[in-house]
Image (spheres, rainbow, N blue to C red):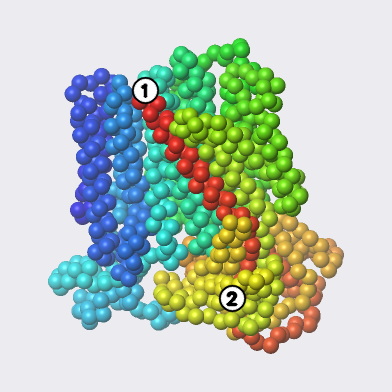
Amino acid sequence: MAGSILLTLAFALSLFSMVMYFLTYRGAKNTLSYARLSYHAMAMLVIISSAYLLYLILSHQYQYNYVYSYSSSNLPLGFKISTFWAGQEGSFMLWLLLTSMVGVFLQSYSQKRDDLEPRVMSVFALATTFLLAMVTPLLKNPFAYVWTEPSFIDFKNINQALLSLPALQNFIFSDPASGQNFVKVSAELNSALQAAGVSMNQLIIQGKGLNPLLQNFWMQIHPPILFVGFAMATVPFAFAIAALMKNDYRHWVKQAFPWTLAGAGILGLGIMLGGYWAYGILGWGGYWAWDPVENSSLVPWLVSVAVIHTMLVQIKEQRAGKSIGRFGRFNLIMSVMVYVLVIYSTFLTRSGILGDASVHSFVDPGMVVYLFLVIFIGTFTLLGAGLIAFRWKSLEEPREADEDILSRELALFTAAVTIGASALIVLVGTSAPIFNQSVQTNFYNEMHVPLAIIVGILNGLSLLLKWKQTKGEEILKKSQFSIIATIVSTALVVFVGGVYDLMMILLAFSALFTFFVNAEIAFRIMKGNRRMLGAYITHMGFAVFILGVIASSAYSVEKDIDLAKGESVKLFGYDLQFTGYKPIPDNKYAFIIDVKKGGDSFQAEPVMYISDFNNGMMREPYVLEGFMKDFYVTPLGYDDGTETKPEGNQLTLTVNEETRVLGTVIKYKEFIKPDMASMMQGGDFEMGAKLSIEKDGKKFEKDVIMHSHDGSVHFQSAEVQELNLRIELTKIDPASKNADLVVGPITADRSTMVPRETLSVTASVKPFVSLVWIGVLVVTIGFFVAMYRRLRESWA
């Protein structure tokens, strides 16, 4: 109750602050002090509410639904803290908390700049008001009691000493199928317990706990960093709207620029920490799967990176005395879009609309929350679009006649448009599930390689160009070292690295050109003003990142193998031998694989266990990280024997692909989607492929299904008796939707191997993944160096 009251008061104060700031902007007297006081009071109440929620989690107050649903007393302290943002309500609280705190700094920053504070803070307070509305008792309130909506709680979470309580007897239920017993928790039970002098917290002595997939170090830092980036995205939006309100565009870009840099740097770091989490902990085999929810946070980051480059041009021209400067309209539109896309990202993640398309998506929150999220997006979209349309004519800036095609302005704008095109492609693909469509991973890869090549070339070229115009011979003279170094390095990539794909060669050339141009300039200015190094550091990090992506994505090798105990298997130059398993802490099992290569040897120990959280099979990969390459092992399953192996033609199909085998045309028509929520939690699920089979004018449709039950995987085959044809599914990948099939006659001989203890794994070698992480770190450092410089300039 106390938490709900605090949030309701905070909502009222945020709304009041917004009104007072707007009245101040409109010329009202004696309202500014009320606006400031109410905003700071709101921020303080949000901080107190957040601290109170954390206290409830750490003190095991299971009468609160959020605490019961995500926490438990046996979690380590770090994991208990991370339950604060594990669910919908808590993650909204985290976003609200960080946004409110950013607003405190923004208020201090803006109050020293003429009449900027009332305009900027009225917009910013609108954002905090919407976030507060989301966590009030009417929507996703983290302080709702467990009996607010009836639910069934397992006996294992109930105080056994109270099971004989007379008041409890009418609320005990049994499930004959599972043999489990439950207590129905409802408002009626709470009233009965109160009449008996018992509190709900005395009855419920254990929470459900945290999803095992979230029980790792990265869960403790990835979401907070991501939400800091989300909170920071509010600031450029507020500056853009403030400029449009007054129809004054002289200083807003300069003042918003350091915030945009910081937000982009933090959001990018948060996104890639999520990638490292997926790679090293979750066992997905890669750091980026183009999952719709992953993409949803990538889009605003791409837009923020695009607008940074055109903001530079506008700042440069305003210093030269222009009132608006080039790309004024573009910068306003993109600054508005960054925050609108952050809200859209939230909508995709939390509306449940991607429940069948992404393993990251939250469950359906209900129609009221769904509609509120739509209103949230619509309000900020209409506010930005409406003001830009209203001020459109006043935003015109005459183009200077002396500008040449070989100018830094044009190069930066072209780069921004290219990055914007990347954001649009990702946005379209990410939004496709809303319309019951799906986009394959290859779509993103094939579309982005040419864009990355263009961005890399433009990046290096823009630094060789002067403002306004540049002579061709000047560019050649300034780029001699960079071009020679790029050509030599690209030749090494081809002839030593074995990269022969034309697009990959061009991408490597582009990245190396970026690296050497920036490195040469950075070296020259090292002895001067080191605060100028930010952009060059960021660009070099980007180049290193791209080189890492080329090596690790295009040239990694992977194979599913069965390792019979005691039997050595050769793979990718390694000798692998499964020797058994051992128990490790937390009721987990490490499966031991002796790995040898040359004179070196080590033990790979992937982990599998049955989780108490949902009785599902959980898998943790083993990764031997190195600068040159990573050796990666993901456990698939364990058996003490070998299943019957079907004879036939082996093939792999993607969705909508068809092939001819044994005189029969087989087409993969549709991917049968799994229950993503159950799959993410390690529960039971099914997925498969819908096939079309045609021969001699006869058509058939069959489904081949993979069933996962209690951690065991079984495949359901399909038979077409008229064609004497049997189709068996041996593997299906939910990310790429590729299906591995074995096609043969029904009457084929089916041999059986001698039963043997066997571990099934996916083993892979991924070259130069280290460059991906190094590149991300360098990019982040560069963003903050640039932010420091631009922050100092904004005070001038």
Return the x and y of residue 645 as percentages of the image width and height.
71, 79
Quarter of the image for the N terminus: give it.
Answer: bottom left
Residue nearer the viewer, 363 or 722? 363
> Which residue is tagged 1?
796
Residue found at x 51% / y 65%: 679
Please, which residue is most extreme toward the top here?
401
Residue nearer the viewer, 487 or 86? 487
Residue 729 seen in this snapshot: no
Please, which residue is most extreme toward the front here?
527
Residue found at x 45% / y 64%: 213
Return the x and y of residue 56 as percentages of the image width and height.
25, 60
> Which residue is tagged 2?
593
On screen, 44 above or below 146?
A: above
Return the x and y of residue 22 as percentages of the image width and height.
29, 26
Quarter of the image for the C terminus: give it.
Answer: top left
Kind of residue at badge 2? Ile
